[in-house]
Image (spheres, rainbow, N blue to C red):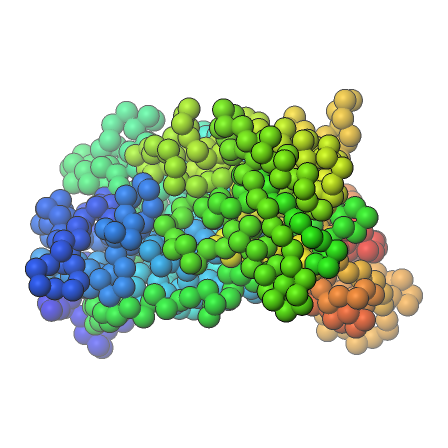
Amino acid sequence: MKSGNSSNDLSVKEKAENLLSQMTLIEKIGQVNQRLYGFKIYERVAAQGACEDEIVLSQEFKEEVSKYGGLGVLYGLYRADPWSQKDYNNGLTGSLATKAYNQIQSYVIEHSRLGIPMLLSSECPHGHQALHGYLLPVNLAMGATFHPELVEAAYKVCGKQMREMGIDMALISALDILRDPRWGRSEECYGEDPYLAAEFAKAVVRGVQSQQVAVVAKHFCAQGEGTGGINASAARIGERELREIHLPAMKACCEEGVQGVMAAYNEIDGVPCHGNSLLLKDILRDEMGFQGVVMADGIAIDQLDSMTGDNISSGALALRSGVDIGLWDEGFGKLSEAITREPALEKELDRAVLRVLTMKYERGLFEKPYIEESEHYTTYQYDANQESLQLARESIVLLENKKELLPLAFKEIKTLAVIGPNSDEIYHQLGDYTPPVLKEDGVTVLEGIQKLVKAYGDETGHHVKIDYSKGCGLLDKEEDKIAEAISVAKKSDVIVLVLGGSSSRFGEVTFDSNGAAKSGEKVTMDCGEGVDASDLSLPGLQTRLAKEMFQLGKPVIAISIQGRPYVLTELSEGADALLCSFYPGIKGGEAIAEILFGKISPSGCLPVSLPRYGGQIPVYYNYKASYRAMDYYDLDKTPLYPFGYGKSYTKFSYHDINIKMVNEKKKDRAAVKEYTFSKTEIKEQGVEIRVSITNTGDMGGYSILQLYLRQMCSDTVQRVKELKAFKKIWVPAGMTEECVLSLKGNAFSHWNSRMQFVTDSGEFLLCIQDGEGVVHQEKLSIV
């Protein structure tokens, strides 16, 4: 292998600078270029007399390497899905995957004058988007767990798998905040709250980067504020909303040392993120201290043409604004023409190339560019790595349980009807950006119930008959099997009605040039990238199917498996029990079955408010105190279910609540009701709230304590309340555990009228609540 002319005596920075000094302009441009679709650069070809196929590299790949004297970054070598048209028949699996990586890396190095290896980027929005990729529930489901530590553990598994496959950069949705549920990418958000999202974003960075894989957090910034919920549309917000809602997750990632960030498609107040130096330089680097690489989103640099009118100018604008690496665009390939026009631009190019080279040195690619060729990464089986299943268990939210119908008692049921279009569709549980999965890995709701019922029957001799009918299609209003469903349901003791939506690409889906789904008459998705909705009702004939089930006079348990908040008003009113499950992942059916029959108690809480009607949008809880939210004359002035809501099968009592400084050893403030703190105390120590939790029920369960603050007076309008801390704690039946919630000094700070982040003297309302309502309220003062 050629050497990168480095010395062990030099620092990483010195090595990168030394190498940069030897590069031609074309070689530099090649380092910031990520134009290729990695899944298109190879073919699997059967080899004569060999038991394993050979990998043949495309001419386009070879020409790209030749053109730039190497390759900076390769995107998506392992990507598999309907857009990439890679599956188990023609994609990369087992040792063939690692063999292909080494073959490609070797070609790049041997055809680079300076022997520079490539970086490999790969999608990992909810697990690695590859054949045999370890998959997780979607972000909204993770947010519903209120359990960042579990998410960190799950992403360690993903990170380890990716590292063994040679992946350098994992592209992970971690920054988007859900403010309009009409947006098709709602599922990629952790929720509507900036603090909740920031805690999960940090967990993802810790988990993946602990395995020596760089996280490229996306999308920066404010993509969840799109006009009308339309993907990539204008975020019509000012700096205050940007800072209060959309920047905290990125700041949290920077504090965890995130190594990459992807710019967002949208514009903010008229300025596209890819051409926004205030965002990518002043805020991201100067304020937040970000040291990593900024990557473009797919073809986003070329989309600047609508503003610049010139693709060469678009590439120059993105580079000048702070983008370091392109993605599938032509603009970054024309930087030589841009530099001819503007010679000073080469300094910006050098800055970007230096960051790319630094990452390559930091990752040890010059010393160890190849990976072990083995099938080891395929051993990440779900039985051995149960984080995905546990996330599904903890993500499911119990919204209604009238007359305590749940959990179901096996012995009281002879026949159970499982009805609905999401009862037995594994891809409807997985969300967008999902690879093909093996049937033996997935568990649908029907399969989960069948498995649990069979195990109980084998153990006790009491067998429950399971009848199934799809009832209707998900979106197709022409397919009407409701009569069959009614017939099946009439014979049952209990009806499990499984409805919802789908972000599955595995249907009649056409794709845009950036891989987003195109909406159209034949689309089989109602959610996902490119699939925005004007109506938040359950799609197709599902509401009609539900009404028919309610009229039978049987107990009905409704389950909505979804990628965005729906209007579930009719289900809430008609069903005896109602569960909300944001795409729960490959083992989601097993988790739902366990909750239905009381193997576990539900512990999820809503990471996003659910509206009563579509016209209530926006319905997020943290609106400004200057107006009355949802104050319409013709409907109830509350969401159907608010942020943070979720029931359990057990009951908790909260007592011995004490508020004090973190290191305080003096008198008990709770005893004398003296909740007055100085600014110095707040800034240096913060506040600690201790709560004793007793499980007064008959079943062990999780309690989720949520702590909210409201600043009563300031020089700008504050929000009615803001989440500032939360804790998920397991409490066995009949036992008491202590929960400690900590508020750092900046929890009491706000952006003032001069856009300074300050802590003012004044009164604050502190509210502690669990999934079912307020536990305790207290006023405290800062002087």
Q: Is residue 547 left or right of residue 733?
A: left
Against 559, is 729 above or below?
A: below
Residue drawn at 49 percent across, 63 percent down = 154
Residue at the far top in the pictured view: 634
Q: Nearer the viewer, residue 743 or 608?
A: 608
Residue drawn at 68 percent across, 44 percent down = 492
Residue 263 place in picture, x, y as percent: 40, 43
Q: Nearer the viewer, residue 6 or 435?
A: 435
Against 642, is 724 above or below?
A: below
Against 451, is 644 above or below?
A: above
Q: Is residue 45 left or right of residue 271?
A: left
Residue drawn at 28 percent across, 25 percent down = 309
Residue 73 place in picture, x, y as percent: 25, 53
Q: Nearer the viewer, residue 580 or 239?
A: 580
Residue 644 in sight in this render: no
Res. 237 image quadrant: top right
